[in-house]
Amino acid sequence: MLLAVMFFTRGVEKASSWAGVLGTSLAIVGVVVTILTSWWRQHAAAAAPATSEALAQAAEVLASRVAEQWQREAEARSLNDPDPMPVRWTLSDDALMDHEEHIAPAPVAFTGCSDRMPELVGEFRKLHRRRLVIVGGPGSGKTTLAVQLVLQLLVDPRPGDPVPVLLSMVSWDPDVQPRVQDWLTDQLNQTYPALSAFSRDTARRLAERGRVLPVLDGLDELPERRRPQVITALNRSLPRDGGVILTSRIAEYTGAVGRSDVLTAAAVVRPELMTRDEVADYLAARLPRQPDPSWQKVLAALREGTAGALSAVAAAPLGLWLLRTVHIDARQDPEALIDIDQYPDPRSIQTHLLTELIPAVLQSRPQRVDDEDSLRPKRSHDPDDVRRWLTSLAIELRDAGSRDWRWWHLARHTFTPRQFDLVGGLTVGLVSWLVGGLVIGMRFGLVFGLVFGLVVELIAFSTSVDTEQRTTSPVTSVRNAQRHQAVFGLVGGLAVGLAVGGAAGLAAGLEEGDLVIGLASWLAVGLLRMPFDSASTAFHLAVGLRAVQGQLPWRVMGFLDDAYRLGLLRVVGPVYQFRHAELQDHLAPLHPSPAVVAADLAIPS
C-alpha cells in the first residue's frame, strides 16, 4: 500500500527508492526474528528441569572436567615428578575436632603419607560423613593434599560417590549466601559452563542432591569475622550425610573454632615435618646417579644434621620445592646454603630462594619451540620484567586484602570513578563523531544493519554452550566477556542500522537530511556507551594505562598464562593466584617503604 501511494504521489523514482528501503528492512527484520527464535528455543530448553538421567550425565561431564583441570594443575606443579613429596599427615589436637563417635569408628585414626594416596583416600572413606579439615603452617602442603585427594577420588570412584570439586572459598560471604549450596551453585556455573547445556538448574540440583563434594581451599584467606560464619554455615546447611574437605592455616582455624564451633563430624589433620633422610632421598632422586661434589656435600650434611638452617627450610614442602626448583632444575651450586655464616637462619635461606625463583624457572622452562600444548611458556621473558609485573599484581592483591586476582577487578584498582568517566566520555565522543560522519551516506545505514545482523547470528552460534565446552580459566573468561560484549554491541549496531536505514529512506523522500545526522549521532552514542561500560572494555583500558606506566605488559593475559606455565601462578576457575602465598608476600611485603614500592614498580620516587 505504501509503495502504491509513493508511486502515484512521488513517481517511479521515489517508489523505487522506497522499495529498496523496505526490502532491505524486511530482510533485516527476518534476521532479527531468526535470532530471537533461536534464543527463545535455547532459553526454553535451558529452563526445563533436568531429569535424573540428565543429572547423571552432568555428573559424569563434571567429573571429566574436574579431572582434566586438576591433572593439568598437578603437572604444572610437578606433583608426581617422579613421585610426590613424602609428607606425613596425622590427627590434630582434640580441641579442634568433634566427638570421636561422630567422626569415625572409635578409636579415630587418620594417618598416611602424600606419596601413598590410595591409603589416605581409604582413611577418608572410613569417616562417617567424609568430612576432613586440613590444617598447617604456611607452605606446609595443605592445598597440594587437597588436589591429590581430588585426583585420587576421581581415579578410584565408588558407586554413588559425589564428584569432588576444589574451589577457592574467598568469594563466599555467608551474610549473602547462608547456605553452601547456593554459593556452590554459582561457582559451578561460573567454572564449569558445560553444565548449563543440560539445563539451567543442573548445577543447583547437583549441589542440592549431594552429587558434589565441595573441597574448599583457603579458610584463612577470608576476613577474620567471616571465618566462624563459614563454619557455622557449613554445620547448618550441609545435609546429615554431606561431606566436605576444608583447608586452612592452623592459627586461623583455631581462632575460628574458638568463636563458633568445630566442623561437625570432621577429622582434622596436620602435616609432620619431613625427616632428614626423607629430604635427602627426595633430592637425590632428582639428581644424577653421581651428583657433583657440591651436592654430595649438601646431601651428606642433610643426612648428618650438619646442614644448619637448610635442614629446617627443606623439612617443609615449600622450602623443599624451592630448593629443588632453584638449585636442581636451574642447576645452581647449593654448597653456600650450608654455610651458617652466609645463611645463619631459615628466613635468610627462604628469602634467597624466593628471590632466585623467577630467574630459575625462566631458565629451567625456556620458551617452547613448537605448537604443542606444553607447560613451557609461549613467549620469552626478561626476569626483571617478570618480577616487576608480578610485583604489581602482588601489591594490587595486598591492598585489596585478597589472594585471588580477578581480571574484572583490575579497572577498580587502576582508575578512580572520575578518571574512568573522563576517559569514557572522551572515547565515546570521538568514536561517535567518526560514526556520525559515516552514516551521512543515505545507503550506509542499510548495509550497516544487514551486515551487523548477520555477524550477530554467527557470534551467537559461536558462543552457544555445549557439553564439550572446557573448564573456565582466566583466559577463556576474558574471551567470553569479549564475545558477549561483541554480541550486545552488534545487536545495538543492528538497531542503529534499522533506525538509520528507515530515517535515511524517510529523509530521501522528504529531503530532511538533518534528521538522519541527528538520529544517527544519538543512536551511535547509545551504541558505543553500552560496550564501553562492560567489564571487558574497562579491563583493556586499565591494562593500557598500567602498560604505559610499566607495571604490566600490553598482552597481560598472555603473560599470566606464561606465568602459570612457569609454575609461578596457579589457576582456580576464572581467577589467578600466586602458587604460594609466600611468593606474593615476598614481592609485596605488608608494610613496605615508599622507596621499595617505587623500586619494585620502576616508578620515579
Image (cartoon, rainbow, N blue to C red):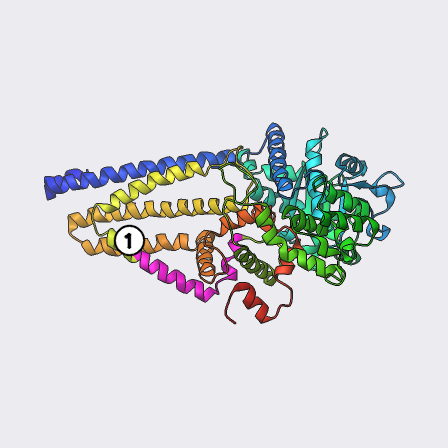
> Which quadrant holds residue 229?
bottom right
Q: Tell how many labels.
A: 1
Residue 25 spot, x, y in % from top left: 26, 40
Q: Looking at the image, which residue is at 42% across and 39% down? A: 460
Q: Choose between 284 and 391: the one closer to the eye.
A: 284
Q: Is residue 5 visible?
A: no
Q: Secondary structure at mark 1?
A: helix
Q: Is residue 399 above or below residue 524?
A: below
Q: Nearer the viewer, residue 568 or 269?
A: 568
Please rate how many residues cluster around mark 1, counting C-alpha atoms within 10 Å: few if below 14, some from 14 to 19, many from 20.
Answer: some
Q: Which residue is mark 1?
A: 435
Left of 136 or right of it: where is 463? left
Whether residue 239 is in magenta: the answer is no
Q: Position of residue 6 (x, y in %)?
A: 14, 42
Q: Which residues are magenta?
A: 407-432
Q: Residue furthest front?
A: 293
Q: Quadrant of the N terminus?
A: top left
Amino acid type of disc 1? Val
